Image (tube, grey):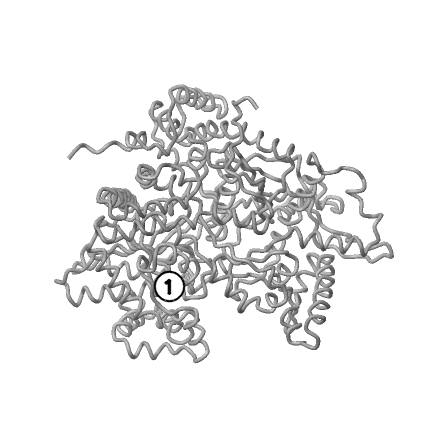
């Protein structure tokens, strides 16, 4: 066998990484050294790995700045319609490699770094993840930014610059322990503070009603300080902006009214104002009605709206004369109607979940205290809304109660989803089945009243980060067959159907997967000290830990498989390495117990000599964007096993599909459309459909019926309950067993039997590598629909009223 190429030599051959021209490389080296000596002001002899990372980051950033300025200049001149994507979460991960990919600098930087005697991967590992999100929703926002820039939209992401992002997860004695994510500790080379655009945001106070209008007075002011991060499109010289707001106390904060000796305390109290942007709330799909969270929501919205209006007035064709800026000449009512009409035509609402515990319902007294004027305006919006409902449905008081923005009963609350629907011209779900459920159940009344508002926009992922960057080997094998254009137009992957019986292509696809598995196995053995069998099936479920995502169903399969091996140790079993990863919200007791159960099962299984390397169970600690980029390309089987009707879309499912894993899953979220695109027979679909779940809700779900009927299920539950996996604390998992037996909203047992049978089919197919790989090719070929470029093109044309373009802007070094 020929000697394998070194990582560096192999990278040089990958065309999708850009050309390493000699001048380019020499320039990069020169700029790298300049930054090392002058930007970082370091003595060359004491430079650390981190200094080298910062020097490289600044060198790459230099290539962004000219394009960034030119892009923003072109927006100012052409004054296109702007798109503002406002989110409390942007889960960006690392920026360095993504920037090199989008600027076609990857090979040149590799070569320069190599010639300087440094290791590119070691430098990349120095970068902290920007973990300003919990999971799917925050990562979606990040993919959308990439696609909006790549499609030439004049788009801006607006959010909060949390000082502490999603916590780092440590597993200690099998339990999750959280530690603060101090991601800004060493500084962030990708951001630029913009104090000249600072904006005041008001809280508390009271309202005064006068003949000439209403005043909001005696408020507390917090300043919003913006930090800009460049967002480069894919090789089109466009660089958009993500603007994140940080909270600052004003200079006079609490000082005007300090008494003798109160000065020090007044300065210390500045922290109270600045706490607004201190930390990301770590809940995924769960509403926690805390004052600080409502403050964060209003903070980002108030600062962003002021910024949008400033930009609207200042743009070349935005009129600056008094007529445009002064509404005082209009009677109050006209001005109000005008404002509400503008709001409706400007805003669109994307719903991300149907779980009732995730929908925001703010207590009225909290709203009254924090935002008294806004509550009055909400009452007025509701009054007009209720007037319209009653005129359309005279005498239907129950419908009025259901549709009100204000929920009565117990303590009164503002239903924020209802407010969003009424205040927007478009409302969408994030996968076809999810959008259908919204229209049929959650927002049925609103759909009946305004059917034209409701749309679907199936989620997508950016193929730049989730293929070219994280899986260059696969990207190259694809490019050798169909060229490189698929990176901007992922539908072109359909052409791979022509190669489904091509022996060489089948071999190449399998080889890339095997290389990715070997690389990940090395990573795992370094981090977990478990010996991995790289020929085993890598069976992976990575996502936030939640009852609806049914990591417990996965656990029951693991235990069943373990029991079968123990019963027939001499049978030929398909070996598996089962990996589960994800964070539990710190206050979510059941989710934390699920993690403890997974680690407990691992302790038993991994130390059982009878099982050997036929089954290993690994909990992937601190799952985050950067770990996903390593794990997903190495996976064989993707677990997407939520109860039908609960996962709005899912996006991890799409990443696995694009990276050559097969899916075992329910007909939920985007799985439905994935099966449609790849062909039903190329996914392992099992379990109840939404209709079956509804029927079961109607007749009642009885867990013990399954427990008593299915011996292997009974055995597994009895082992968990009896302390087989926790001999030192036999009743450790009694809460989990009690939940599964008596109040399981997500019907784990109802899908157990079909899941186990489906897993047997998975194991059988894995023993036929060629057939397996053919299904993989069908999946990759069918994944084009799930590019966020397609999603964003649909939003642009069907909601935002702007046209995407693949045109390039001239590079800064080109003459204009």
Q: Is residue 526 visible?
A: no
Where is residue 557 shown, x and y percent of the image? 29, 65
Where is residue 103 shown, x and y percent of the image? 45, 32
In the figure, residue 334 lies in which quadrant?
bottom right
Give the side of residue 108 with respect to residue 13, left or right.
right
In the figure, residue 68 lies in which quadrant?
top right
Residue extending farthest to the right is 211
Q: Quadrant of the N terminus?
A: top left
Where is residue 335 shown, x and y percent of the image? 79, 52
Residue for badge 1 = 666
Where is residue 638 shown, x and y percent of the image? 33, 55
Query: In the rendered image of this protein, does residue 725 appear above or below residue 374?
Result: below
Q: Residue at x 26, y 60 (%)?
A: 762
Residue extending farthest to the left is 570
Q: How many marks?
A: 1
Give the side of residue 324 with respect to residue 128, left or right.
right
Front residue of 137/660: it is 660
């Amino acid at each position: 066998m020929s000697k394998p190429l070194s990582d560096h030599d192999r990278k040089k051959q990958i065309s999708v990484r850009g050309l390493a021209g000699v001048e380019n490389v020499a320039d990069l080296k020169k700029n790298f050294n300049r930054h090392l000596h002058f930007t970082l002001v370091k003595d060359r002899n004491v430079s650390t790995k981190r200094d080298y990372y910062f020097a490289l980051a600044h060198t790459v950033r230099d290539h962004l700045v000219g394009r960034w300025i030119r892009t923003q200049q072109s927006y100012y001149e052409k004054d296109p319609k702007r798109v503002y994507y406002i989110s409390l979460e942007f889960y960006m991960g690392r920026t360095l490699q993504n920037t090199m990919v989008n600027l076609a600098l990857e090979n040149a930087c590799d070569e320069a770094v190599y010639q300087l005697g440094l290791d590119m991967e070691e430098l990349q590992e120095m970068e902290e993840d920007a973990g300003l999100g919990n999971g799917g929703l925050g990562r979606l926002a990040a993919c959308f930014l990439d696609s909006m820039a790549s499609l030439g939209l004049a788009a801006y992401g607006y959010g909060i610059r949390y000082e502490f992002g999603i916590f780092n997860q440590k597993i200690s004695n099998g339990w999750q322990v959280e530690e603060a994510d101090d991601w800004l500790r060493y500084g962030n080379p990708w951001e630029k503070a913009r104090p000249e655009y600072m904006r005041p945001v008001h809280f508390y106070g009271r309202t005064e009603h006068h003949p000439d209008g209403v005043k909001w007075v005696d408020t507390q002011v917090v300043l919003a300080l913006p930090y800009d991060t460049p967002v480069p499109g894919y090789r089109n010289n466009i660089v958009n902006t993500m603007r994140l707001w940080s909270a600052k106390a004003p200079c006079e904060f609490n000082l005007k009214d300090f008494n003798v000796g109160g000065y020090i305390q007044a300065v210390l109290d500045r922290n109270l104002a600045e706490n607004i942007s201190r930390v990301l709330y770590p809940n995924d799909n769960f509403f926690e009605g805390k004052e600080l969270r409502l403050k964060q929501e209003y903070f980002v919205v108030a600062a962003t709206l002021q910024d949008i209006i400033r930009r609207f007035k200042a743009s070349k064709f935005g009129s600056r004369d008094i007529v445009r800026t002064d509404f005082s000449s209009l009677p109050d009512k006209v001005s109000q109607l005008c404002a509400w009409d503008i709001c409706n035509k400007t805003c669109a609402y994307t719903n991300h979940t149907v779980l009732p515990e995730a929908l925001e319902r703010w207590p009225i007294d909290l709203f009254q205290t924090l935002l008294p004027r806004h509550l009055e305006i909400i009452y007025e919006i509701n009054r007009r809304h209720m007037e319209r409902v009653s005129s359309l449905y005279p005498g239907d008081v129950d419908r009025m109660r259901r549709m009100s923005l204000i929920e009565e009963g117990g303590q009164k609350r503002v239903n924020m989803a209802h407010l969003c629907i009424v205040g927007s011209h478009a409302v969408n779900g994030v996968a076809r089945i999810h959008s259908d459920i919204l229209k049929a159940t959650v927002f049925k009344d609103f759909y009946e009243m305004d059917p034209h508002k409701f749309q679907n926009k199936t989620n997508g992922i950016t193929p730049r980060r989730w293929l070219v960057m994280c899986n260059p080997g696969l990207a190259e094998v694809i490019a050798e067959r169909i060229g490189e254009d698929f990176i901007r137009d992922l539908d072109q992957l359909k052409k791979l159907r022509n190669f489904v019986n091509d022996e060489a292509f089948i071999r190449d696809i399998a080889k890339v997967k095997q290389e990715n598995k070997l690389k990940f196995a090395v990573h795992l053995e370094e981090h977990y000290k478990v010996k991995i069998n790289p020929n085993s099936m890598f069976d992976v479920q990575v996502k936030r830990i939640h009852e609806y995502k049914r990591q417990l169903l996965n656990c029951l399969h693991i235990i069943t498989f373990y029991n079968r091996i123990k019963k027939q140790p001499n049978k030929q079993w398909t070996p598996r390495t089962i990996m589960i990863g994800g964070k539990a919200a710190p206050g979510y007791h059941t989710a934390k117990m699920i993690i403890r159960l997974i680690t407990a099962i691992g302790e038993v299984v991994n130390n059982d000599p009878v099982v050997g390397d036929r089954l290993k169970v690994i909990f992937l600690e601190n799952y985050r964007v950067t770990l996903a980029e390593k794990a997903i390309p190495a996976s064989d089987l993707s677990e997407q096993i939520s109860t039908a009707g609960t996962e709005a879309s899912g996006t991890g499912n799409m990443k696995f599909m694009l990276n050559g894993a097969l899916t075992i899953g329910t007909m939920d979220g985007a799985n439905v459309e994935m099966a449609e695109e790849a062909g039903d027979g190329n996914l392992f679909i099992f379990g109840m459909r939404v209709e079956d779940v509804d029927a079961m809700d109607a007749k009642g779900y009885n867990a013990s019926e399954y427990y008593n009927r299915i011996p292997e299920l009974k055995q597994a539950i009895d082992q968990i309950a009896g302390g087989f996996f926790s001999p030192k604390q036999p009743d450790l998992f009694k809460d989990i067993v009690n939940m599964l037996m008596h109040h399981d909203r997500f019907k784990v047992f109802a899908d157990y039997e079909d899941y186990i049978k489906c897993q047997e089919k998975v194991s059988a197919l894995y023993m036929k590598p060629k057939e397996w790989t053919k299904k993989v090719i069908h999946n990759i070929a069918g994944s084009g629909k799930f590019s966020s470029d397609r999603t964003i093109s649909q939003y642009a044309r069907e909601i935002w009223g702007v046209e995407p373009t693949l045109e390039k802007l001239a590079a800064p070094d080109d003459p204009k």
